[in-house]
Image: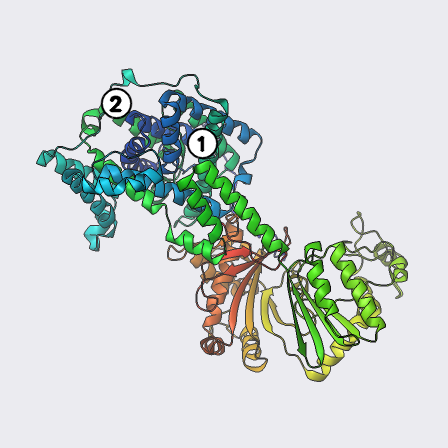
């Protein structure tokens, strides 16, 4: 059985009975879950849309127009079926600045131009490139916008009028506090209290109450109190739709308008695409695993957002973007298709036409308090901890400061510049240390060896005593020509003065010199990257064979024909090992034979033939104590049912060999995980099925709401198989903790656990990152960069 191909498919074609009448045209049907979800989203979107319009200084109808267009247009034509689009808090500062500088009609025209730009970008299929922006910059941009929003709305909460910039709002805050209006402050305080307390109501009554959105409860409660008490506070005023302002020809400097178009395009596109990726994760984490809901098509989503912005601007609405709060509510309410998003847009239209007298009762301080809380929540403590852990807090801080003090486009540009500077600093930073150990001089070079490091490298090399025994340890992945010549010239001079030089890698393995030219000339087809699958180098088998076997053994790899006989292939490989490799490793293996094995880690991985553990880990003989089985599974203690091989290996490695770490390595395209997904209760109890039952906890973990789905750096898992492969690594690490020797060593602090995911097609390894590498994981697999550093995982 081939484990790396799907065992079977569960999607069968629909077969029509021979004598049944032909199927008629499908009717448009709305699932009950979509209907209820649309109502929930509508109740959240209505007050938020009015509040965001108020915060920008635009006509209040503009928020309703954007919400309706976002639901109907972006919902219908976008590539993320369950994402809800509309006026976003992240666009408040940008829109407010454009309105103040160019007026409302020109701002609408800028929105139309931004939508056309998004449509052009979608045709170029560059949506994925927006995800390449550092998460620290995106989170910093949103945090800066949140701070600016909160400062502006605080003035309305206190009964005043916000200033034109965040700095002016801060400077004017003491005077505003001195003349705060008690009525407006009371309504705002009531709104904030309802927003914060409603989601935390305890008990069964609280669970039922939380089905009503907190935003609706807060605004409705403040409106009812103000109406019953007859409080004199400013209220919403929706003028007649007949006087609604539509866009006009852009008026202003061309460069300024172009900058506005670029800013709207950038913010709406990045926010929408990141929100779409987050929605995919939320859908996959539901109890139904998002069955029937397609994954987001980001280029189509960009086109849908562009079409929505064109229409919203043309109808006098605010810019439109995908928004996380409403999208989360839509997914949590159980929506199964884009019908829920479109229906929510329809309810907005009906409310704007029929509920104007009710909307006019809403106090403006209540809407300002609602938007202020949303702005404060945009400064996420979780995001700050993430960027701090990944050493990008400087990028985050610069972006936040730039957005607050200068502007969004300028702040993002500053963040990008600092991110590039940080990346170049990491690339160019080379640390060279020297120590003397056991009569030998150890020169440790950490980082990339470029021409920038040549002066320091040369100085460190020439400080070593002549005629001494030197070990140069290179802990990096790149050496340019200048550094190579410096090291080579010094080595030749040092050897000429009677010294010795040994060049090693980061694990201490010796770096061998290139093979002699004559050896490579003997096999001209062999090159450093010659594919090794069935590779024969044109050699004739040395054993006696039939004519057919000989022809098969000498056939060029990759051509159609008979594959070489298995025995001949194996014998040929062993022969090449004895001829080429054995002379290089004989001394090391002789030492291991004398001293015994002392591996540093237990490496537990899948039996898949494509996983070459020594290649992935750059390890040599004696480094790894390896256990391979189908699906890299670790049976829980007591559930082995007669097969104690894995438990015995764990006990031997931990108690006898005293390994320092245990690594569980999964991989992409795992046939065992595919078999688990396709398995059913009626499958025959074959040996494979009996073994795969140890992977059922991974399947349950993936379906459980108590566990967050495992994520992979920069993107969500490609499909359910990859998600199960990632989850399985995390679950098997949990199984390891149940073993008494492992638990004891973990408590002593002498053992660590690690998870690795190897993507075969990308030849890329991902390391499971955790807040505490021994006790807890955040289920994020982080890319291992060629420099040896880890790439920060993108937030979803």
Q: Which residue is nearer to you in this view: 375 or 704?
A: 375
Q: Residues within 10 Å of mark 2 (few under 14, many from 20)?
A: few
Query: Which badge, 1 or 2, comes first in the chain's sequence?
Result: 1
The answer to whether residue 25 is seen in the rendering is no
Q: Which mark is residue 770?
A: none
Q: Is residue 563 left or right of residue 431?
A: right
Tell me the element at label 1.
Answer: helix
Q: Is residue 188 left or right of residue 56?
A: left
- Residue 587 is situated, as x and y percent measured from the top left of the image, at 78, 77
Q: Quadrant of the N terminus?
A: bottom right
The residue located at (31%, 30%) in the rendering is 53
Asked if residue 518 is positioned above or below residue 750 in the image, the reply reads above
The residue located at (75%, 71%) in the rendering is 502
Q: How many marks?
A: 2
Q: Is residue 306 left or right of residue 765?
A: left
Tell me the element at label 2.
Answer: helix
The residue located at (58%, 31%) in the rendering is 124
- Residue 434 is situated, as x and y percent measured from the top left of the image, at 66, 71
User: Closer to the observer: label 1 or label 2?
Assistant: 1
Residue bearing the label numbered 1: 264
Where, by quadrant of the figure, is residue 453 drawn? bottom right
Q: Which residue is nearer to you in this view: 184 or 687?
A: 184
- Residue 346 is situated, as x and y percent measured from the top left of the image, at 32, 27
What is the distance, in whole Å, between disc 1 and disc 2 at their CAs?
28 Å
The answer to whether the residues at label 1 and label 2 have Cβ atoms under 8 Å apart is: no
Q: Which residue is nearer to you in this view: 653 or 796?
A: 796
Q: Which residue is nearer to you in this view: 144 or 307?
A: 144
Q: Residues within 10 Å of mark 1 (few under 14, many from 20)?
A: many
Furthest toward the left, the residue is 229
Residue bearing the label numbered 2: 353
Where, by quadrant of the figure, is residue 176 drawn? top left
Where, by quadrant of the figure, is residue 371 drawn? top left
């Amino acid at each position: 059985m081939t484990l790396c191909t799907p065992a079977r498919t569960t999607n069968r074609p629909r077969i029509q009975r021979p004598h049944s009448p032909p199927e008629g045209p499908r009717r448009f049907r709305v699932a009950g879950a979509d209907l209820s979800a649309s109502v929930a989203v509508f109740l959240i979107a209505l007050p938020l849309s009015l509040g965001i319009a108020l915060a920008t200084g635009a006509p209040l109808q503009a928020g309703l127009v954007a919400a309706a267009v976002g639901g109907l247009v972006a919902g219908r034509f976008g590539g993320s079926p369950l994402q809800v689009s509309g006026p976003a808090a992240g666009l408040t500062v940008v829109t407010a600045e454009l309105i103040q500088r160019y007026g409302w009609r020109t701002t609408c025209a800028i929105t139309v131009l931004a939508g056309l730009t998004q449509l052009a970008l979608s045709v170029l299929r560059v949506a994925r490139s927006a995800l390449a922006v550092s998460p620290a910059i995106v989170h910093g941009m949103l945090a800066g916008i949140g701070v600016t929003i909160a400062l502006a709305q605080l003035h309305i909460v206190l009964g005043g009028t916000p200033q034109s910039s965040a700095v002016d709002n801060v400077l004017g805050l003491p005077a505003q506090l001195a003349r705060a209006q008690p009525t407006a402050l009371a309504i705002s305080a009531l709104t904030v209290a309802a927003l914060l307390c409603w989601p935390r109501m305890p008990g069964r009554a609280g669970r039922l109450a939380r089905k009503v959105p907190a935003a609706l409860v807060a605004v409705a409660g403040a409106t009812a109190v103000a109406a019953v008490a007859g409080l004199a506070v400013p209220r919403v005023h929706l003028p007649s739709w007949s006087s609604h302002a539509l866009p006009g020809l852009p008026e202003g400097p061309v460069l300024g308008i172009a900058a506005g178009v670029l800013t709207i395009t950038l913010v709406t596109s990045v926010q929408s695409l990141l929100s779409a990726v987050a929605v995919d994760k939320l859908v996959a984490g539901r109890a139904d695993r998002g069955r029937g809901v397609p994954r987001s098509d980001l280029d189509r989503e960009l086109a849908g957002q562009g079409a929505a912005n064109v229409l919203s601007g043309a109808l006098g609405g605010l810019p439109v973007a995908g928004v996380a709060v409403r999208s989360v509510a839509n997914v949590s309410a159980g929506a199964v298709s884009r019908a829920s998003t479109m229906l929510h847009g329809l309810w907005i239209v009906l409310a704007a036409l029929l509920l104007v007298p009710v909307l006019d009762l809403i106090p403006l301080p209540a809407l300002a308090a609602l938007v202020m809380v949303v702005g404060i929540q945009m400064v996420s403590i979780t995001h700050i901890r993430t960027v701090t852990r990944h050493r990008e807090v400087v990028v985050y801080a610069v972006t936040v400061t730039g957005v607050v003090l200068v502007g969004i486009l300028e702040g993002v540009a500053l963040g990008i510049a600092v991110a590039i500077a940080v990346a170049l600093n990491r690339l160019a930073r080379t640390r060279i240390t020297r120590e003397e150990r056991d009569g030998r001089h150890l020169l440790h070079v950490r980082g990339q060896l470029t021409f920038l490091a040549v002066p320091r490298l040369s100085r460190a090399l020439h400080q070593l005593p002549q005629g001494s025994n030197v070990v140069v340890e290179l802990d990096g992945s790149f050496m340019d020509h200048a550094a190579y010549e410096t090291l080579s010239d010094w080595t030749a001079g040092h050897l000429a003065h009677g010294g010795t030089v040994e060049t090693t890698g980061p694990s201490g393995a010796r770096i061998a010199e290139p093979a002699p030219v004559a050896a490579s000339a003997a096999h001209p087809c062999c090159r450093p990257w010659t594919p090794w699958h069935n590779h024969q180098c044109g050699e004739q088998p040395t054993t006696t064979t039939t004519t057919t076997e000989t022809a098969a053994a000498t056939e060029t790899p990759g051509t159609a024909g008979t594959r070489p006989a298995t025995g001949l292939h194996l014998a040929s490989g062993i022969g090449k090992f004895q001829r080429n490799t054995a002379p290089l490793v004989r001394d090391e293996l002789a030492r291991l034979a004398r001293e015994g094995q002392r591996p540093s880690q237990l490496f537990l991985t899948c039996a898949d033939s494509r996983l070459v553990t020594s290649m992935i880990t750059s390890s040599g003989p004696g480094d790894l104590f390896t256990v391979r089985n189908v699906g890299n599974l670790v049976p829980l203690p007591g559930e082995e049912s007669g097969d104690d091989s894995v438990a015995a290996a764990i006990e031997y490695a931990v108690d006898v060999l005293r390994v320092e770490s245990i690594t569980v390595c999964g991989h992409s395209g795992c046939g065992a995980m595919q078999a688990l997904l396709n398995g059913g209760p009626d499958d025959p109890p074959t040996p494979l099925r009996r073994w795969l039952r140890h992977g059922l906890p991974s399947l349950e973990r993936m379906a459980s709401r108590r566990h967050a789905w495992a994520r992979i750096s920069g993107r969500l898992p490609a499909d359910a198989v990859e998600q199960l492969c990632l989850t399985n690594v995390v679950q098997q690490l949990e199984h390891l903790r149940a073993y008494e020797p492992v638990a004891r060593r973990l408590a002593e602090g002498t053992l660590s656990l690690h998870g690795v995911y190897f993507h075969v097609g990308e030849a890329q390894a991902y390391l499971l990152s955790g807040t505490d590498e021994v006790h807890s994981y955040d289920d994020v697999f982080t890319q291992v960069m060629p420099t040896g550093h880890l790439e920060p995982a993108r937030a979803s």
